[in-house]
Image (spheres, helix red, strand yellow):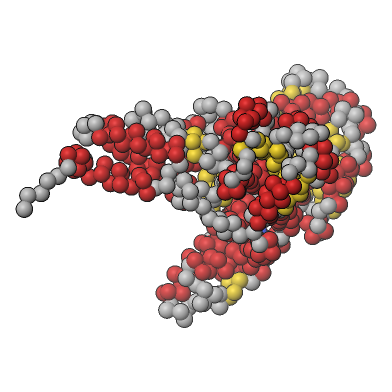
Amino acid sequence: MIFFRKPEEEEESKLAPELRELKDAAPKAQLPEHVAGVVARELERLEKTDPSIPEYSIGINYVEYLLSLPWHSFTEDNLDLHRAEQILESQHYGLKHVKERILEYLAVRTLCLLRPFQVLVVDDEEIARTNMEHVLKKEGYQVTTAANGLEALERARGQAFDLILTDLKMDKMDGLQLLEAVKDVAPHAAVIMITGFATVDSAVAAMQKGAVHYLPKPIKFEELRSTVKRIFEKKRTLQKTRGPVLCFAGPPGTGKTSIGQSIAEALERKFVRLSLAGLRDEADLRGHRRTYVGAMPGRIINEIRRLGVRNPVFMLDEIDKIGQGFKGDPASVLLEILDPEQNSNFVDHYLDVPFDLSEVMFITTANVVADLPTPLLDRLEVIQYSGYSENEKRDIARHFLIPRQLAHHGLSNQAPAFTDNAILAIIRGYTREAGLRNLEREIATVCRKLARICLKGQGAACPATVDQELIETLLGPRKYIHEVTAADNRIGVATGLVWTEFGGEIIFVEAAAMEGNKQLILTGSLGNVLQESAQTALSYVRSHARQYGIDPDFFAKQDIHIHLPAGAIPKDGPSAGVTIAMALISLLTGRPARRDVAMTGELTLRGAILPVSGIREKLLAAQRAGARVVIFPQRNAVDLNDIDEELKAGLEIVLAPEIDGGLIDKVLLPR
Ligand code: ADP
């Protein structure tokens, strides 16, 4: 038998297999209209392109990429707030204030999503009114009716409608007049104008005046249903994302990522995390244009494709760390990505077609938010995370970190018990941090070594308890000692408390005098504010020299050098003023300063001590370093009241309004 092929089939058969596959796949990919058009055009172009030239494979990759994106797939949110609370609670110790803020955020979101839409139907014909009311009520909307424009306006004053469906021709106040009037009364209500066939012009006028749609009379109910549904779907998406974007701020290792993961788990969404630290180029986020050789899509779109859904919880990590010399303006790129009005049409340069990111729940993290550009900060709802106290760390280690690491290292069955002292030994001897990163790492090291011991003795040698001694055997010599208790009291060295992006820290301010002529030398990568603090402290000491038994001419033949150690790390801020003054007074009076007295506060020329920030973090740092006395500005008393007693235990807290003889006696020992 002779088999005849139709000419177009013959054409098709000549297609390369990869092109054939794409042509088959395209109609099944449920692409949005604008993308389907682009794909069709690209495929057409490829059919005419010689497969041996690079443009061909670039084109094939491009179409493959477009087809593989999750244009329509998303996960259904689980809106059970009680379950969310349980998940947050079971996976995190403490963080009461953070959990509350997150549950409130989720509650508002859920309420917005569950609230039925309110519709106002305005028509002077009773039958039309009742029919529309019936159809819309069946769709689950709450419907109110009005027989004319005036009545409608009255109703809109008392109730917030999402949609007003109004007839055009009515007595008293017609549809167009109502449209104008509701702009003031109910600015968020969408208006659909219902017009007779004869008045298409007025329908156009209505659209121009701000109606979102018009429907001809007699109303087709199917059209009514689908139009209203479309309008509400759009509103829902906006509502879902209109709220501010969460920004978790705080030192590393305090649970920011981990809380983000719990939120995703609670909502039953997929989770992805992308660190922005050191990004140098806008193209990293938004892709390269395809004209570049080796062009690639940006990281955002790539992650969405990898997850295969368009509504994950997307954590943008360290938004304060975008690399210096970033090409393009990082704040405006971020704003575009985070703003639901703009991100529903996010264009990745490689894709070159908009992709809707408005269903993505973005969460950002930062160590310090103070330096973020204001427009960006305005969009963010900052939730502050703070460091953990020693006891909190011990409890988290016991209940979360140790069981997890034992399981990861195959030790769940043997599960050696860690004593409290063992855990504290790890915290004190091998970590010095506000968060838990190194603690978890050290626990992992212990588990690794335990695994080896257990395997060697085939279970018999597995220790039943891990105590302090075993920790020291496994982890080797301690890495850290209590800095302040271990150090000697010296003349010209005072202990200060500062706040950095890693949490609170202890610093030793050093002052030295040498022959010279009235020079103040400042070193340690000090910023402008810190340099001015040092000058103020010096002037304060010079102007009060007699009061403290210092030779008023001391500066005449001397240079003074002030140094803040860790010289390579830039420092700034006013809170070291008091410490610098104490180091100077110690130097000039020859009285040694107590190392275990740590202080913070901004000093004025008169000697008044002004309040500073980061009190909790500083208190934690003092505790970590083993300080016994902490001096805070008097006006920080309110901040201290908010802090758990546990954090203050074992510390003598002195609240000082100003520097005076009494305060100096607290810090300086007799000569
Ligand atoms: P961040 O993102 O702030 O740097 P992570 O979320 O990575 O910190 O936290 C570091 C580790 O400490 C993670 O293993 C995390 O599960 C754990 N962790 C942090 N805070 C808590 C907490 N409150 N309860 C239990 N585990 C915690």
* Of residues 133 and 626, the one drawn nearer to the viewer in this rendering: 133
**Residue 628, visible in the rendered structure:** yes
* Of residues 311 and 505, the one drawn nearer to the viewer in this rendering: 311
Horizontal arrangement in the rendering, residue 651 relative to residue 117 (left or right): right
Horizontal arrangement in the rendering, residue 641 relative to residue 493 (left or right): right
Residue 478 against residue 630 in the figure, above or below: below
View quadrant of ligand 1: bottom right
- Place of residue 462 in the rendered image (x, y in percent of width and height, measured from the top left): 50, 77
Residue 575 against residue 487 in the figure, above or below: above
Horizontal arrangement in the rendering, residue 580 relative to residue 195 (left or right): right
Quadrant where the C terminus sits is top right
* Of residues 580 and 515, the one drawn nearer to the viewer in this rendering: 580
- Place of residue 187 in the rendered image (x, y in percent of width and height, measured from the top left): 75, 36
**How many numbered marks, from 0 up?**
0
Q: What residue appears at the point 89 percent right and 37 percent down from the top-left corner? A: 659
* Of residues 448 and 561, the one drawn nearer to the viewer in this rendering: 448
Q: What residue appears at the point 50 percent right and 72 percent down from the top-left corner? A: 411
- Place of residue 440 in the rendered image (x, y in percent of width and height, measured from the top left): 57, 59
Q: What residue appears at the point 19 percent right and 43 percent down from the top-left corner? A: 9
Q: Tell which residue pokes out farthest to the left in this image.
A: 1
**Residue 587, visible in the rendered structure:** no
Picture quadrant where residue 214 is located = top right
Horizontal arrangement in the rendering, residue 548 relative to residue 65 (left or right): right
- Place of residue 5 in the rendered image (x, y in percent of width and height, measured from the top left): 14, 44
Q: What residue appears at the point 89 percent right and 32 percent down from the top-left corner? A: 607
Picture quadrant where residue 494 is located = top right
